[in-house]
Amino acid sequence: MHWTSWFDSTKALLLTAAICAVGVTGLWAQEPEVTDRAGAADENPYTTRFDVRMGERLFLRQCSRCHGQDAGGNDETGAPDLTTGRFANASSPAGVFDVIRDGVRGTAMLPITPSTPDENVWQLVSYVDSLSTNPADVSLPGSATTGRQVYAGKGDCASCHMINADGSRLGPDLSRVGERRRPAELMADLVSPEDEVEPRWWTVTVTQADGTVVEGLRMDEDTFTIRLMDQDERLWSFSKTDIRSYDRMENSTMPNYEETLTAGEIDDLVAYLFSLRKEISQ
Amino acid sequence: MKRFVLVVALFASVQLVLGQESNSNIATPSLTPVTWERLVNAADEPENWLMYSGTLDSQRFSGLDSIHNRNVGGLELKWAYQIPEIDRAETTPIVVDGVMFITEAPSNVVAVDAATGRPFWRYNHELPDDLRICCGRNNRGVAILGETLYMSTLDAHLVGIDARTGNLVWDSVVADYRAGYSKTAAPLIVKDQVVTGIAGGEFGIKGFIDSYNAEDGALLWRADTIPGPDHPDNRTWAGDSWRTGGSASWITGSYDPDLDLVYWGTGNPGPDWNGDVRMGDNLYSDSALALNGDSGDLEWYFQFTPHDVHDWDAIQVPILADLEFDGEMRKVMMWANRNAFYYTIDRETGEFLIGKPYANQTWAEGLDENGRPIRVPGTSPTEEGVVVAPSIGGATNWWSPAYSPRTELFYVNAYDGEQKYFKRDEDYVEGERFTGGGGENVLPQDAYQSAIRAIDPRTGDVRWEFLLQPRATAGVLATAGDLVFSGGVDGYFYALDAVSGQELWHIQLGERVHSAPMSYAVDGQQYVTVAAGNVVYTFGLDE
């Protein structure tokens, strides 16, 4: 046993001083963080087109490293997509201001440099706000009402997709697709679905040890396991060490609607899908 | 009166905190001072892990073999230490005579009992609230000499800390954090010096590698990673671009005592993605530097990516080994670069020996006879964006590779991703980001392959690979038990057979492994330690 006491008088004195300093620092760190957000009404005073442009410049310089040049997020850094108009830690422009000003504790989202003036922070808020599309500002050639009929009828979309818990799980849930996809992107999804299929929707075949094959959508994969959902919506979970092989099928399960719908019907479908947003009961 | 009440309240609060602190801070058991001789011969005492990469040659190889490729399946959790600050731990602890020193976010260090995980003391480094840091509040580890620990801090200080008590011994300002300088990497002890790098390559800093007197923290020498205007290599920077050219040095280097050379990697030239404002090769960015161990004088350099426009830092830990090469023993350096090429270099002279891609890349047709890349036209960032592999994060990054002298294989965590690269005009403003562009993802990261790859350093050929999903960002440990340990973003920590790459054991830790494992022993029992999320986990066999 070689425990050495540090309670000789000099060291104890120094340590006490050091702990005092640390204690005081810790104390301040626990104080609620104060923001100097301008305006009692929590309104963004900087919303002109000039402000949006200034915000974009600031964003590219200060934020794009993690959130991406297109603000589309980065799953490596954990930075979320900022183009949807919905945020995990803010429900208003003032909330976005607070996140930029204060950061989000316990995440890589650090506070902006404290010397940054409120004006610049609000300009960033305006730029982020400009990235999501307000449906009221968009004029589309199609009719959402007709598009709803195409969705349920000729398009047979509900055989794969779900809206507000009605439909199937074999494609992405579309209940709020209008918040995350712009009309041009929805159009591309309908007429060239084989482009850029996200890994979550890859079709994968797993050959089990006994030679039987399971085909399904790639729900989830990590280094040691893979999970699929087959055509009957049954979930399969495999340990990779227990299977013979697994392979990705390059095709998309989403049909190309250019072949089955008219241009007008596709316009209507886009208008309908774009109208799908979170509905809040009053 | 109000002021009096405030003072009383403050005093009472301080007492409370003081009481907590003094209860928890206790001295460690005695340590045998870690002399320079012990560090040179660290491989001879594998029960201790005396520096960031284990030994001065940075092989991240543990000589312990009681956990081996036939019994590793019995590995079980022995203890877990929760870092109180929630952040993504990047630390590799060191262990000296049964005491483990763990760095914590943002710039703290804690001493714990290496057999139980129980803390002895914690040093909290006070930080300003206006730090300029690019990529998180990280610290990767400490160095030790004698009974003093040395740690980098986010406000660009280097501190000496009493390893027994956690008391501050000295605190040296390395650079001005307000100008974008910061420090995250473990220092390297070289004789009686603390050699250390600097971060800030995204803020238009001007990089260097420093040496400080271990005794008192006085600066001994500074090796500029961008030569000044009186040096001919300064002409590799157009105009005044060298003044803000980055070339940081934010990971730990290596040292060869026989050659008395310090080896260190340098980061990207700044601004990262707009090379138009810094035409030329931009020496010595993205390079391996060999510095004299007494003076810091540059003995040779090897630039992996001349005029880099993709942010492919040569911030990898240089691995040193002696290898038979074409019938002749060569002192070599092994390097899997962020630019997707693997290199073996003669570390006496800097001569390029071999180089080959070890991951997906679309930017170079290959390397010429001197190891210089032959670029594919049209792969530089544009205002509209251009897709190039590897991604900004690189084919690998700062996470440590490992080398086993038993298998003579080099193990690296590799990624086959790509990214769309943009450039833009940007003026330098002190203390602000200075990157001149950026990137965006083409597809989610899990659309690309990640793997542990075992490379033959004589040929550059990939001997085997173990596929990972999704992308992994952990370092690698090799052991004399013929095991390779690493972890994943998916939260797994695993052991592979070092010869075949076959998976032998894994455990789910519930959070991303973003650090490099290490191994040590207490009372004859071997342990393997890795940080995942903000927890440090230690594993061993059932006794």
Image: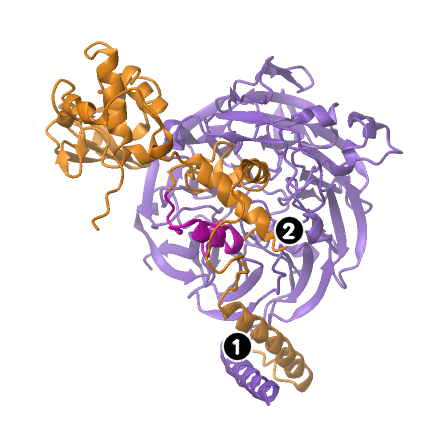
Q: Is mark 2 on a helix, strand or loop?
A: loop
The residue wearing badge 1 is: B21
Q: Of B371 and B67, which appears nearest the observer?
A: B371
Q: Is mark 1 on a helix, strand or loop?
A: helix
Residue A242 locus on image (x, y percent): 21, 33
Q: In this view, does A229 lie to the left or right of B516?
A: left
Chain assigned purple: B
Q: What residue type is labelled 2?
A: Lys
Above or below, comparing residue A157 to residue A17 in the picture = above
Q: Of B429 and A106, which appears nearest the observer?
A: B429
- The residue depicted at 22 percent of the width and 20 percent of the height is A253
Residues in magenta, as a range: A86-108
Characterize the local packing of mark 2: few (<14), some (14-19) or many (20 or more) Cα atoms within 10 angstroms.
many
Above or below, comparing residue B194 to residue B247 in the picture = below
Characterize the local packing of mark 1: few (<14), some (14-19) or many (20 or more) Cα atoms within 10 angstroms.
some
Question: For residue B288, what is the image quadrant?
Answer: top right
Q: Of B225 and B543, which appears nearest the observer?
A: B225
Q: In this view, does B344 lie to the left or right of B258?
A: left
Q: Which amino acid does label 1 sit on?
A: Glu
Q: Chain A is drawn in which colour?
A: orange
Looking at the rendered structure, which numbered label has been put on residue B183?
A: 2
- Residue B530 visible (yes or no): no
- Residue B353 visible (yes or no): yes
Looking at the rendered structure, which numbered label has been put on residue B3?
A: none
